Amino acid sequence: MIEMLSQTLVSLAQAGGQSVDTLQSIQKQLESARQLSDIRLLRARLGDSLKTISDEAKRQRERNAEMLRFAQEAALIASETHPDSEIDPITGLPSPEKAEREITARSGADSIFYAAVFVVERVEGVNLRYGHSAGDQLLKVFGQFLVSKLPSSDEVFRWRGPSFAAVLNRPGTLETVRAEIARVAADCPQTVKLPGGCRWTILKLSEYPVPTEACQQIHRFVAEHGEK
């Protein structure tokens, strides 16, 4: 029986090596024991050893439970700190990463899609004067404004910094689309009450046969006109 217990303990990580060695020592002494007093002494040692093993197992269970709680808390913090990358946490719009994928996919010679880019001005000034929560609220309201002004077939995305991008499904000419977006931008200061205005540009995606070129052009426009 003791031999079986020793072999089992050897395979279990919960039991310390010292306890295994103790049981194996008791096993050898029992095999060579001849007198009743020796057997009684070894039985007492066996009881002490089993109690030690029980205490070790209890401590191991407590450590495992603590590690599990820590892992769960870490996972929760990570999910809150790094939310779903498909959604921008400030505006609730699709994220810049999703915008880049969509614009890249729509680029090419046969495309009838346009990309409209908007940069909200003076957001950094709002952040400095009123705090980042005010600047975030301004961006959220501007995003909602774009969604309300553009057809539901268009897709509005948060871009990086104080900027937004919209993918427009339009069979019309560049001039027609530019005139439409100019009207949307003209309504913006009155509707959103921007401290400044917004800069905007239009890209005809059929003019960007290399998939990444359109996104690179948007990055350059935002870097030139954005504040952060």
Image: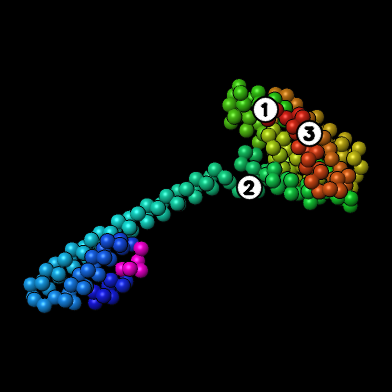
Q: In the image, residue 101 lies at what x, y percent?
A: 74, 49
Disc 1 residue type (three-letter): Val
Q: Earlier in the sequence, mark 1 or mark 2?
A: 2
Residue 182, percent from left and from top: 84, 33
- Give the number of the disc on residue 36: none
Q: Residues within 10 Å of mark 2 (few under 14, many from 20)?
A: few
Sequence order check, earlier mark of 3 and 2: 2
Q: Residues within 10 Å of mark 3 (few under 14, many from 20)?
A: some
Please tell me which residue lies in front, 46 or 34: 34
**Disc 3 to disc 2, how far (Cα)?**
23 Å
Query: Decide: marks 1, 3 in contact (CB < 8 A)?
Result: no
Quadrant of res 214: top right
175 is within the stretch colored magenta: no
Is the residue under label 2 in contact with that under label 1 (CB below 8 Å)? no
The residue to which callout 1 is attached is: 123
> In which quadrant of the rendered view does residue 36 lie?
bottom left
Q: Nearer the viewer, residue 223 or 14?
A: 14
* Rendered image: mark on residue 85: 2
Residue at the (65%, 39%) spot, across then down: 91
- Residue shown at the point (23%, 61%) measured from the top left: 52
Find out whether residue 11 is within the magenta segment. Answer: yes
Is residue 170 found left or right of 139 in the rendered image?
right
Task: Give the residue type at disc 2.
Answer: Ser
